[in-house]
């Protein structure tokens, strides 16, 4: 080993993905500091980063262009300049859930709220059953609804928790913006349809719904209500762009890490699945995503950056 502490190239088995919200109203991303948090436990990322599991076929592509600046006769290259900055990213999620589906589809990820009997059919779900108000004492992991209301829910059921829609326009959704409303709507449940503030019921007891994982937006406000769901739906062709901060970690066999941090990622392609051979003659459907990195200013020196790559020694 030389005096510059050379190490062999990191040998990694898989890459793990973490995502965090971007404040769409202000454009503020979530910044990851590798000097402070580069050695975090892969199973317990620092807040507000969310573990989205292992990914396949991780591929980064730089579209940044470097041109020569020439002067004189004959023309001679005197220096170089970057004329375009661009970076794209592709990968496939190993698992399906609300957040993976949202990130892979790139547009509104609709929650399929349970519908009332006999309602008119709609591609992303008809008129929903009236939402249940939350009572005092509800937390990010425990929803207080009362004994009578709790009887309408089941263990293992998915629920969406958010406020009523009240003719507002702009970005909507608690914790993470799930849609952009261009003109006032009439569906009181619209925000619960697009919210990412969802969870699965782990237990029901004495009017309390205990959730398997905390809600993304934290403790609910008194204005929020809970709706039961049957699943999720996305729509190719709709106009909204998801935008997230992203973190990818490849851990080497000796404990070293390569970390790729994209402060702002937006979808670059439409809804798609990657088909992979599985055992028993089945085919595995993986959520395929392609993304473009958008720029931020590095607080250290004001440089325009689309991605930070860090190496953290063992």
Image (tube, grey):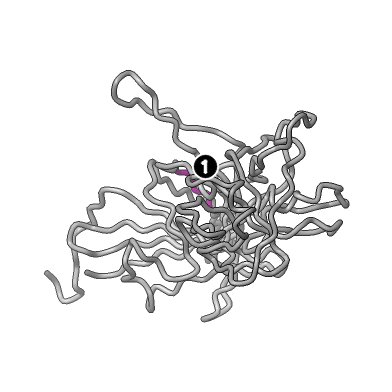
Between 116 and 79, the residue placed more toward the observer is 116
Q: Which x, y percent locates residue 15?
A: 35, 51
Q: Residue at x 19, y 57 (%)?
A: 253
Q: Is residue 80 visible?
A: no
**Residue 71 lies in what quarter of the image?**
bottom right
- Secondary element under disc 1, as helix, strand or loop, is strand
Judge whether residue 297 is colored magenta: no
Secondary structure mostly seen in the magenta stretch: strand
Q: Residue at x 50, y 32 (%)?
A: 273
Query: To which residue does mark 1 refer?
Result: 289
Between 306 and 79, the residue placed more toward the observer is 306
Between 281 and 112, the residue placed more toward the observer is 112
First to last magenta residue range: 87-91
Question: With 180 as the anchor, is 22 left or right in this view?
Answer: left
**Which of the image's four quarters has the C terminus?**
bottom left
**Which of the image's four quarters has the N terminus?**
bottom left
Judge whether residue 89 is colored magenta: yes
**Residue 172 lies in what quarter of the image?**
bottom right
**Residue 207 lies in what quarter of the image?**
bottom right
Please rate how many residues cluster around mark 1, counting C-alpha atoms within 10 Å: few if below 14, some from 14 to 19, many from 20: many
Question: With 68 as the anchor, is 116 left or right in this view?
Answer: right
Q: Which x, y percent locates residue 16?
A: 37, 53
Question: With 30 as the anchor, is 285 left or right in this view?
Answer: left
């Amino acid at each position: 080993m030389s005096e510059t502490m050379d190490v062999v190239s990191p040998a990694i088995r898989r890459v793990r993905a973490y995502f965090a919200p971007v404040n769409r109203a202000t454009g503020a991303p979530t910044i990851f500091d590798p000097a402070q948090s580069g050695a975090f436990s892969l199973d317990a990322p620092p807040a507000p980063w969310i573990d989205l599991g292992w990914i396949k076929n991780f591929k980064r592509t730089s579209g940044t262009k470097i041109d020569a600046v020439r002067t004189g006769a004959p023309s001679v290259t005197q220096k170089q300049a970057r004329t375009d900055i661009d970076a794209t990213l592709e990968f496939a999620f190993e698992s399906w859930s609300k957040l993976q589906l949202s990130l892979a589809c790139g547009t509104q990820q609709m929650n399929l709220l349970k519908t009332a009997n006999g309602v008119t059919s709609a591609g992303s779900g008809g008129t929903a059953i009236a939402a249940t108000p939350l009572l005092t004492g509800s937390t990010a992991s425990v929803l207080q609804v009362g004994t009578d209301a709790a009887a309408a829910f089941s263990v293992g059921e998915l629920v969406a928790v958010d406020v009523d829609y009240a003719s507002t326009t702009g970005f909507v959704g608690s914790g993470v913006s799930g849609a952009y409303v261009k003109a006032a709507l009439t569906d009181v449940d619209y925000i619960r349809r697009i919210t990412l503030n969802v969870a699965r019921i782990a237990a029901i007891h004495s009017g309390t719904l205990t959730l398997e994982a905390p809600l993304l937006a934290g403790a609910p406000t008194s204005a929020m209500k809970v709706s039961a769901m049957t699943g999720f739906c996305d729509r190719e062709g709709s106009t909204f762009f998801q935008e997230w901060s992203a973190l990818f970690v490849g851990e080497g066999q000796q404990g070293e890490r390569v970390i790729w941090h994209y402060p702002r990622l937006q979808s670059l392609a439409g809804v798609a699945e990657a088909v992979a051979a599985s055992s028993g003659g089945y085919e595995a459907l993986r959520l395929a995503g392609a993304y473009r990195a958008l720029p931020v200013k590095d607080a250290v020196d004001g440089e325009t950056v689309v991605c930070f790559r860090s190496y953290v020694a063992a």
